[in-house]
Structure formats: C-alpha cells, structure tokens
C-alpha cells in the first residue's frame, strides 16, 4: 500500500521537528539536512512533499507558544517539557495542523 502525500509529509515533518528539538538547529536547516542527507528513499522527494513537510514543521515551531499553552492548560500536572520527545512533537504537530490547516 502506497502512502499518500500528506501522510509522508507528516512523517518527514516529525523527523525535521526531532532534529530541531534535539539538535537545537533552525527548523529550515533541519529540513534541508533531512531532505539532502537523510531522505530514506532512493528517489529524491517530490517538491510538494518537501514544501508540505517543511511548512508543517515551520508552522509548528512558529506557533509553539500558543500550542504549548494549550497543552499545558488541558493536561493535568503534565507540561510539554515533561513528555517524551516524540510524544510531545507529535502532539504539537497535530495541534498545529488542526488549528491552522483548513484541509485537516
């Protein structure tokens, strides 16, 4: 079964966000590193996939204060910085997409 564009873009955005969070690099630099050095397929990624993934990662980081405030006010005794890295990034990315992407 072939994954659709949005699914693959979300996977890529998560990996970009992981590099951004763990490595402390700028999100655009993390995206470039991922797509040029760590892309898992033999064929280069489609431009639409690159744009969608990079945009989702960039939007997530850009709205981070509002996203983390929403997480903090809706979870009991569980701030985002206490969550496991991947759990926190998936939650942030999902909230960003729900709040700011009309196609979601």
Image (cartoon, rainbow, N blue to C red):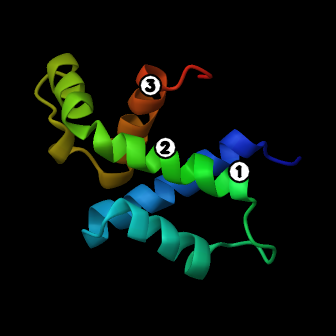
The image quadrant that residue 42 belongs to is bottom right
Image location of residue 66, percent across then percent down:
22, 28
* First-in-chain label (1 vs 3): 1
Q: Secondary structure at mark 1?
A: helix
Q: CA distance from mark 2 to mark 1?
A: 12 Å
Q: Is residue 93 left or right of residue 66?
A: right
Q: Is residue 83 left or right of residue 20?
A: left
Tell me the tag on residue 48.
1
The quadrant in which the C terminus is found is top right
Q: Secondary structure at mark 3?
A: helix
Q: Secondary structure at mark 2?
A: helix
**Residue 57 seen:** yes
Q: Which residue is mark 3?
A: 100
Circle 3 crowding by C-alpha within 10 Å: few under 14, some 14–19, many from 20: few
User: Vertically, is 34 above or below 102?
Assistant: below
Tell me the tag on residue 12.
none
Which residue is depicted at the point 89% across and 47% down? Answer: 1
Tell me the tag on residue 56.
2
Circle 2 or circle 1, nearest the eye: 1
Q: Is residue 78 left or right of residue 14?
A: left
Image location of residue 97, percent across then percent down:
48, 30
The image quadrant that residue 102 belongs to is top right
User: Vertically, is 11 above or below 98?
Assistant: below
Q: CA distance from mark 3 to mark 2?
A: 10 Å
Which residue is depicted at the point 49% across and 76% down? Answer: 33
* First-in-chain label (3 vs 2): 2
Which residue is depicted at the point 41% across and 21% down? Answer: 99
User: Vertically, is 1 above or below 26?
Assistant: above
* First-in-chain label (2 vs 1): 1
Are circles 3 and 2 on residues that touch, CB within 8 Å?
no
């Amino acid at each position: 079964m072939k994954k659709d564009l949005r699914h693959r873009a979300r996977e890529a955005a998560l990996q970009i966000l992981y590099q951004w969070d763990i490595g402390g690099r700028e999100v655009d630099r993390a995206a470039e590193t991922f797509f040029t050095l760590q892309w898992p397929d033999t064929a280069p990624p489609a431009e639409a996939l690159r744009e969608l993934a990079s945009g989702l990662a960039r939007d997530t980081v850009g709205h981070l204060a509002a996203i983390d405030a929403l997480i903090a006010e809706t979870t009991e005794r569980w701030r985002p910085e206490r969550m496991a890295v991947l759990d926190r990034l998936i939650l942030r990315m999902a909230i960003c997409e729900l709040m700011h992407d009309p196609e979601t």
